[in-house]
Amino acid sequence: MKVSRLTAFAMIPAAILLLGTSALRAQGELSPPEGVSICQVEYGLSASSTPPLGPHEGVVVLSWTNPETYQAVEFSLDGKPAPGKVDGARGAGRVIASSGAHTFGVRGVEGDRVSVYKTVEFTVLEESPLHDPITNLQCELIPGQGGILRLTWKLGGDPWVSGLLEVPGRTDLVKIEAGALTAQTAAGSETPNVAVLTFKSSNGYFSLPIKPTCLPLTPAFRRGDCDVSGKVNITDPIFELDHLFRGGPRWFCDDACDANDDGKTDISDPIWTLNYLFRGGPPTPAPGPRQCGVDPTGDFLGGLCECKG
């Protein structure tokens, strides 16, 4: 059968469509992602993800930086396209893979242009190698102004190079430096007494999440001891005035500086303390200037309160 020149020309667009999007993309190449790194965050033998992983699977996180604008980012696993595509503005994505050694790739897409895959080698494990990153973990919920979670621990038998602290209901993460023995963050709105700790090894494997229940702390302080020196004297109103009017360092315990116990810290507090110290005025309200104790009125303002001396 003969095909006219006009008919053949009309068939060209259909032929191009049959080539698929990947062929069109090859016409213009993007710069590939830079600084690609990888770590494993979930393990098939102990995963709690939805849908659940198989016992011989794991979840890895690929991270990178974009040298130019990407519309989307695509992944590969051992030279074949891997499920999942992420917004090009994001710098991280998750890939599920079976246990064993693999080659993971990430490439950028912008319209009809596509970069080459930037690849990294990584072995997916069935369980985390970090079984004992920390010991003697303690967590306190410090009340006031939404609450603060303060965690302390000792180093365990498995070394780690970094860690993360997060709480349910909050999107911000607190980074933990290698060798640190404490961390703190604002309490969450969902379960304000629960924290989640994870630690990462030098070769990119995270520990299983550690989820302590934080016990409420009843802060004790001396009212008027604004600089927490262990006693109420002239240095306390000077310290408070320096912060209020000269931008000096802020106190740690709000209630200790709330000398008149009116529920706020302002100029009236150093005036109250000075009147007590030098003009025979009434002492600061309970727990008072000498005794270390808790706030009996139940209006704790917040802060890290402790008694010295």
Image (tube, rainbow, N blue to C red):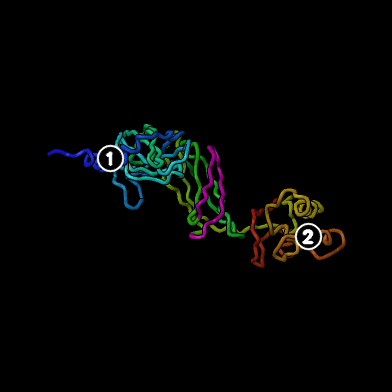
Residue at image location 38% in from the left, 44% down from the top = 94
Residue most toward the left? 1
Quarter of the view holding residue 277: bottom right
Residue 196, how many percent across, how many down?
Answer: 47, 50
Tell me the tag on residue 240: none
Q: Is residue 262 above or below residue 163?
A: below
The quarter of the rendered structure image containing the N terminus is top left
Q: Mark 2 belongs to which amino acid?
A: Ile
The answer to which of 155 and 120 lies nearer the viewer is 120
Report the span colored magenta.
Answer: 170-190
Residue 267 - label: 2
Q: In terms of secondary structure, where does tag 2 sit?
A: loop
Percent coordinates x, y for residue 132 in the rendering: 44, 41
Asked if residue 36 lies in the magenta stretch, the reply is no
Q: Name the spot of residue 158 as percent of width and height, x first.
A: 45, 37
Residues 238 and 219: in front is 238
Identify which residue is drawn at 48% across, 55% down: 168
Which residue occupies the extreme right position in the image?
279
Which one is in front, 201 or 266? Answer: 266
x and y, in percent, of residue 257 in the image: 73, 57
* Element type at mark 1: helix
Tag 2 and tag 1, C-beta contact below 8 Å: no
- Residue designated by label 1: 16
